[in-house]
Image (cartoon, rainbow, N blue to C red):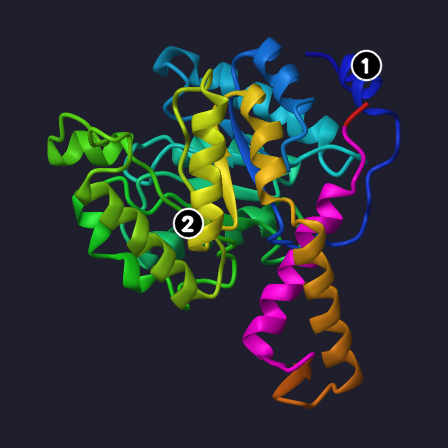
Amino acid sequence: MGQTGLAERFGASGLRCHVRRMDQDFRSLLYAPADAPLRLTRALNSGADALLLDLEDMVAFENKAQARASAATILREMQDRDGAPRLFVRVNSLDSGMIDADLDAIMPGRPHGIVLPKSRSGMDVQHLAAKLAVQEAENELPDGSTGILPLVTESGAAIFGLSTYARASHRLVALAWGVEDLAADIGAEDARNEDGGWSEPFALARHLTLFAAAAAGVPAIDTVFRDFGDLDGLRHEAQQALADGFAAKLAIHPGQVATINHVFTPTGETLARAQAIVAAFSRQAEAPFVSIEGHMFDRRQLARAQRVLARAARADQPPPA
């Protein structure tokens, strides 16, 4: 995929030079194998808030070098272009023996963040953070500019480490949960029950991810819906995730992005309430709570309202050309 083709698809606007804030307002995060140019093109034009360039499970071992080179090209050419999704890279796990080669290839391209698979605890986040600090120094990047998004339920042992993400690193941008590796690790025949919902072990992992994210002060991201042809099922699962407290959802197909974005985009009523809360606190900057039409709102609800406005602002951004 050449630079000319990418520039034509996304316009020739220059890169922004300021240090990027790790805004946690994504609704949809789309996986795309870094060694598949056609799928990358579709992913870039899907409308996803974040694109997760995959060097791990979606890429065969013999294609790892090609995937690294492709990811580096995408980062170099597309990072921070107007309308482009934020670019994360899912590297290989800390114990794979491949993560250093992954980081050497991609860090010169300034990824917004690294997706850490098979994370077992906050110590794994700290381990990756140390590697990123070295990479940022070597590539003359601002210290701390690269976020970390760990997948925190991909083994039985990882479940017992969920409480350790709080205060693990200032780089932590969110926690996401996964199913397939966990199912393999515990020997589950199926992660779903007869009604199509999560069976009890996986429902527990999902719930604990929500609590761990709340303890760490970061958003929780719901796992993928694998039947990408069933948009009604996806909509139902996304709506349940939103109701339970998840801030976004992972996707595995570009066709899922519009549904996820629609569900996680605030409704007019939700947006109006958030605007009212933020406006009330702006008039009473030091107040611990405010009253609006007979209802009390505290600063935790202010933070929630600010996230709603951030998601709404993201939704208002124009899609890629």
Q: Residues within 10 Å of mark 1 (few under 14, many from 20)?
A: few
Highlighted range, magenta: 293-319
Q: Is residue 87 left or right of residue 276?
A: left
Name the foreground residue: 190 vs 73: 190
Say above or below: 50 vs 206. above
Q: Which residue is mark 1?
A: 4
Mark 1 and mark 2 in contact? Answer it, CB < 8 Å.
Answer: no
- Residue situated in front as seen by the camera: 287 or 140: 287
Corner quadrant of residue 56: top left
The numbered mark, 1 or 2, whose residue comes first in the sequence reads: 1
User: Which numbered dot is residue 221?
Assistant: none
Q: Nearer the viewer, residue 311 or 91?
A: 311
Classify residue 225 by image quadrant: top left
Q: Secondary structure at mark 1?
A: helix
Residue 257 in percent (x, y) is at 58, 28
Q: Give the residue pinned by disc 2.
A: 128
Residue 263 seen from this side: yes
Residue at the image position 30 percent from the left and 40 percent from the top: 118
Using the image, determine if residue 290 lies above or below residue 46.
below
Q: Residue at x 33, y 40 (%)?
A: 94
Magenta-colored stretch includes residue 298: yes
| Type of the residue with mark 2 | Leu
Quadrant the C terminus occupies? top right
Res 126 → quadrant: bottom left
